[in-house]
Image: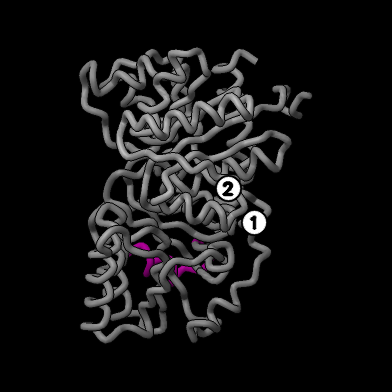
Amino acid sequence: MRHPYGLRLLNILHTECGLNWGGQEYRTLIEVQWLNANGHRAWVACDPRSEIFRRGHKLGVEILRVSMRNNADLVGLRAMWRFIRQKKIQVIHTHGPKDSWMCFPLHCAGHPVVRSRHVTVAIKPGFCHSFIYNHGCRRVIATADIIRDTLIRVNRLDPARVDVVGEGVDLREYTPLLDGKAFREEFGIAADAPLIGNIAMMRGDKGHHFFLDGALEVLKTHPHARFVMVGEGIGGKRVERELRERIEKAGEQKRIIMTGYRWDIPKVMAALDMVVVASIEVEAQSRIVPQSFGSGKAVIATRVGGIPELLTDGQNGMLVPPGEGSAIAGAVRRLIDDPSLRAKLAAAGHVTAKERLSLDRMMESTLAVYGRAAGC
């Protein structure tokens, strides 16, 4: 049987060793959901201690319980080997370092392995660090052009083996047609209050402190504005605690709201007037940018990583320097004071999402990579 995109239907095993939750894990689950909804059969192999294991079940994804305690976890490798034979897996798609090394023997045995690289931090040069990318898979997917360029320049990967598949958004889920009234009512936010949101897991590189700096600055001149930080901390949750302490010390719990983790991000987006991506490093294209575009929201984002690949300053959003709360404040003030500019940027972003960033388009590109890896 063949897929509408011209490829035969495939059995695909995704692997992910990460224990925490973030954009990489979210994207993996979304890809598996899409594949299963479009005629393929796909599973995720992950460590039972991980957040993707826990949350994947909630999203209806079939999970293979695999021990991934180190690069050579033989118990986990045996479990994957049995599963691959049982389900007649045709493509293995790895996402993390441990699972990629664990799949090296499978690659050597002739199984088509595709390796994704999700972060912009350069892999150290040298044979050992680059080995799994050069010799442990048939193809590499970079989730941004900047990542592909680094892999080729620093790690000497063959350009013909590295494909770019950026972020995508389900335009049926993220749409300007959604109503955000319920979210505003939940937190007592007036319908006419400018509402600015930051949606990200709470860790140092996401720039939450600079978003908070900007929010406190804006409230001095625009007291009717409201800010929300949507997400949760990882590990010891140090960043989350620090943010709560700063907000409480400033007495701004009613105007700067921390919502915790939310499953209903499309409805959160619907309630916002603008979205701020405040990352200071380690950002590929950021899934929040396409989601904001799809929702018809104006975006302010820092000029880091692969974000400028999606957002052109003054055309479909605003770019600001990373690590500068005052720059965020200036951009937010400008969009509060100029609703026509805000609407223009939001409309242009929505066009970008429809023309370039649909989930279907992203997965069509992914399937093409699978086809090249598996020779089908």
Residue 182 in percent (x, y) is at 59, 78
Residue 130 in percent (x, y) is at 28, 21
Is residue 144 among what the camera can see?
A: no
Colour logic: one colour
Identify the disc placed on residue 231: none
Identity of the residue drawn at 54% across and 57% down: 346
Q: Can you name the residue that lies furthest to the right here? A: 1
Q: Quadrant of residue 137?
A: top left
Is residue 108 among what the camera can see?
A: yes
Residue 85 in percent (x, y) is at 58, 24
Number of residues whose C-alpha sits closer than 10 Å to that of mark 1, classed few (under 14), some (14–19) or many (20 or more): some
Q: In this view, does 175 lie to the left or right of 139?
A: right
Residue 145 in percent (x, y) is at 41, 30
Report the Cα–Cα distance between label 2 and label 1. Answer: 8 Å
- In contact (CB < 8 Å): disc 2 and disc 1: yes
Tell me where the magenta segment starts and ends, as one range: 330-341
Identity of the residue drawn at 27% across and 78% down: 247
Q: Which amino acid does label 2 sit on?
A: Val
SS class, disc 2:
loop
> What residue would you read off at disc 2?
169
Q: Quadrant of residue 174?
A: bottom right
> What residue would you read off at disc 1?
173
Q: In this view, does 93 lie to the left or right of 242?
A: right
Q: Is residue 187 left or right of residue 245?
A: right
Instruction: Name the dominant secondary structure of the magenta segment.
Output: helix
Identity of the residue drawn at 52% across and 49% down: 290
Q: Does the magenta stretch include residue 334?
A: yes
Classify 267 as above or below 21.
Answer: below
Q: In this view, does 375 lie to the left or right of 292?
A: right
Image quadrant where one finds the N terminus: top right
Identity of the residue drawn at 50% across and 32% down: 165
SS class, disc 1:
loop
